[in-house]
Image (cartoon, rainbow, N blue to C red):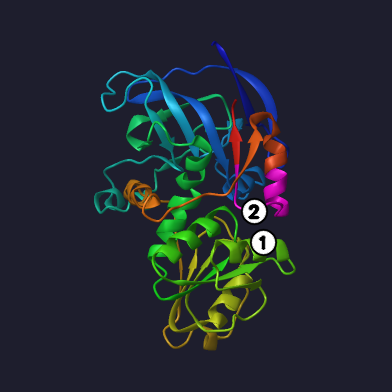
Amino acid sequence: MNVMRAMVLEQVGAPLVARQLAVPHPGPGEVRLAVDACGVCRTDLHIIDGELPDAALPRVLGHQVVGTVAEVGAGVTALAWGDRVGVPWLAWTCGSCHYCASERENLCSAARFTGYHRDGGFAEACIVDARYVFRLPAAASPVQMAPLLCAGMIGYRALRFAAGARLGLYGFGAAGHLVAQLARHQGREIYAFTRPGDLATQAFAREIGATWAGDSDRRPPVELDAAILFAPVGALVPLALAAVAPGGTVVCAGIHMSDIPAFPYQLLWQERSVRSVANLTRADGRELLALAGPAHLHPHARVYPLAEANRALDDLRAGRGDGAAVLVTR
């Protein structure tokens, strides 16, 4: 195969364009993957909308990639042809800065990200740094594994900062429905918040195991110990603060959020806190994949052909469908 199909972002604010591109070849330390599936993430929308400004266009989006090693670059010994691997958002770090040296590579200022700085998985093939992939079971379903590589991993990182028995989840899409399963495995109560009037997603949340589900502008029936915001809506921060008990934490899990409005200090008082989560580390990914089996993580996936990437993105933007959207190449 000398050419491959790809869905390419060529202009901010425009739909992706179907292109035939030359199949890339790996350099030293890299491998080429034959892509089987790639999850669709709200971060892809932020890149399309220009809310993440550093993307050099044209760019192949997609950072929840499941594929098979099809070509191995010089110096790669840990992977071989035919290995099944997963590719996350984090694509490369410097390895030597203060953050990398202190096990916080997610904060490396030189970090590069899949589908943002490097071409991603909305294509039949992609090139990745062999050090930044995760081995996956050969028999695992690519469609089931893809949402774990961002929605699951970054959701897991956010969950680690949200202690307590009663957990609120604002936004119940790809990340929310996976975090709910993890939290239920830990014995917690889940309170799910959706767009006002989205009764279908509220019913889905209760099917997943939520104790309560309602509109995001409502107060839950109990005080929460913590809340995680997956919806990129800054106006939800004061609402979440009002819903958490003294000492509670509001975790903002998105890479982009609209401005947070001013709110009275009383909402923050009594040792409530607001914090963000940035990216992920490879350790987060390994821990999440190790938990997936014991926690019986089951992504609810909506499958789209690669050529229908724009429809998948439009559905995500409009909040149509439950769970996670996944593109498949065949």
Q: Secondary structure at mark 2?
A: loop
**Which residue reaches farthest top?**
2
Circle 2 residue: 322
Q: Residue at x 70, y 51 (%)?
A: 317
Circle 1 residue: 201
Q: Is residue 268 left or right of residue 173?
A: left
| Residue 315 on the magenta span | yes
Q: Residue at x 40, y 70 (%)?
A: 187
Residue 111: image location, x then y, percent: 40, 43
| Residue 120 on the magenta span | no
* Quarter of the rendering occupied by the N terminus: top right
Q: Amino acid at mark 2?
A: Asp
Residue 133: image location, x then y, percent: 37, 36
The answer to whether 103 is drawn above or below residue 258 in the figure is above
Quadrant assignment, res 301? top right
Q: Secondary structure at mark 1?
A: helix
Q: Which mark is residue 283?
A: none
Tell me how many marks there are.
Answer: 2
The answer to whether 246 is drawn above or below residue 115 in the figure is below
- Crowd class of label 2 (few under 14; some 14 to 19; many from 20; radius 10 Å): some
Q: Start and end of the magenta stretch?
A: 313-325
Q: Residue at x 33, y 49 (%)?
A: 290
Q: CA distance from mark 1 to mark 2?
A: 7 Å
Q: Residue at x 49, y 33 (%)?
A: 118
Quadrant assignment, res 10? top right
Q: Is residue 158 left or right of residue 73?
A: right
Depth check, front residue: 91 or 107: 91
* Quarter of the rendering occupied by the C terminus: top right
